Image (cartoon, rainbow, N blue to C red):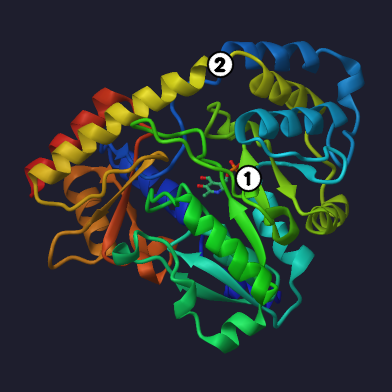
Amino acid sequence: MKLARRIDNLPPYVFAEIDKRVAEKRAQGIDVISLGIGDPVEPTPKNIIDKLCEEANNPANHRYPSYFGLSAFRRSIADWYKKRFNVDLDPNTEVLPLIGSKEGIAHINLAVLDPGDTTLIADPGYPVYNTGTILAGVSPVHVPLLEENGFLPDLSAIDSKTVKDAKMIMLNYPNNPTSATADDAFFKDLIDWAQKNQVIIAHDNPYSEITFDGYVAPSFLQFPGAKEVGVEFHSLSKTYNMTGWRIGWACGNTRVIEALGRVKTNIDSGIFNAIQYAGIEALEGPQDIIDEMCGIYQRRRDLIMEALNKIGLKTRKSLATIYVWAKVPDGYTSASFATYVLDKAGVIVSPGNAYGPSGEGYIRICLSVKDDRLVEALDRIESLI
Ligand SMILES: Cc1ncc(COP(=O)(O)O)c(C=O)c1O
């Protein structure tokens, strides 16, 4: 049997590997605490679950959904963008529901790039930025996010030929994995640069609502000219503890949205209608969950920072996301430290290099674990070092 060459080039998905290692350790009777995967442990709010149950009982929802999502859901997304970011979106041409933003992030490569094209991806970055390009036969150019630049890309450092060839750039602030945030000046410069160089911006914004210490994250679309050059991905996963529901969207530039929709209509058949109605309830119903979760994550961030500082691991105080990005101790690589912590303490942390070569020398710790388990994991790490 011969399989596709692109499969050989596809690295194993980092979190699938982490799941495997947790299962192996647990099979050996080890009490593993995973700080590896950004998956909220708190439940989805009840009003959203109740809406799903109600709509799941309606036979009208048992049929194929509309390819482009329920118009009521698209309208709800547009209304939320207006209320939250003061961004105007046409629900019919500038909003496209996705089966989780991950699939759109992978599929956008098929919509805007041809094999052999150049595309720029944040490094370190959410792994699908890289693997999505591989599946599309495109070679990505990694744009390093360095600590000395606040984990923002230095666009002026990209060589002029690469910039000339590049068709798209994939970025994400508030950032996974570094937890860095970008200010208004960054987005304005990015848009100017993209206009000048004819590069499409794909901005991935699933953590805009998970913010701390009074920080309010922007949408890339709220800056002048954004819609002419790009799209933004968003998701209900992290905002409303809905990772398992698979519901997100892309919005912004009409041509990119249309092209992405055309790819998707040929591959999938949309999101279960009952989940889209639950999505409307998420966006339009009570919003208390957001403050509640931000409070929980902020407390966990502080616990982690305090513990890591005590043992001399350098961290940056994050203003957003569900991650803490920390430097590994001298003498370790990302992978050797993650392996050490797993083998000796039974704690999973993600090695930074799993997010790209510029993640080497760091680990990522997730805030999505109950406080008592987090405290235990931190105690175990502390006693190692
Ligand atoms: C930066 C980033 N983008 C996209 C996603 C995917 O989110 P979704 O659940 O909507 O597919 C994640 C999930 O962890 C993420 O961290």
- Residue 369 - label: none
On screen, residue 121 above or below 139: above
Apparent side of residue 129 relative to residue 260 in the rendered image (left or right): left
Q: The N terminus is located in which quarter?
A: bottom right
**Label 2 to label 1: alpha-carbon separation:** 28 Å
Looking at the rendered image, the disc whose residue lies closer to the viewer, 2 or 1, is 1
Apparent side of residue 29 relative to residue 84 in the rendered image (left or right): left
Residue 305 point in image, percent of width and height: 20, 40
226 or 80, nearer to the observer: 226
Residue at left 75%, top 27%?
76
Q: Earlier in the sequence, mark 2 or mark 1?
A: 2
Q: Secondary structure at mark 1?
A: helix
On screen, residue 15 above or below 135: above
Mark 2 burial class by Cα count in 10 Å: few <14, some 14-19, many 20+: some
360 or 216, nearer to the observer: 216
Residue 99 point in image, percent of width and height: 71, 41
Q: Which residue type does callout 1 highlight?
A: Gln
Residue 315 point in image, percent of width and height: 22, 50
293 or 99, nearer to the observer: 293
Residue bearing the label numbered 2: 45
Residue at left 65%, top 48%?
221
Pointer 2 with pointer 1, Cβ within 8 A: no
Apparent side of residue 327 relative to residue 136 in the rendered image (left or right): left
- Residue 222 - label: 1
Q: Which residue type does callout 2 highlight?
A: Pro
84 or 231, nearer to the observer: 84
The answer to whether residue 48 is seen in the rendering is: yes
Q: Residue furthest bottom?
A: 161
Q: Secondary structure at mark 2?
A: loop
Residue 41 point in image, percent of width and height: 43, 27
Residue at left 28%, top 35%?
301
Mark 1 burial class by Cα count in 10 Å: few <14, some 14-19, many 20+: some
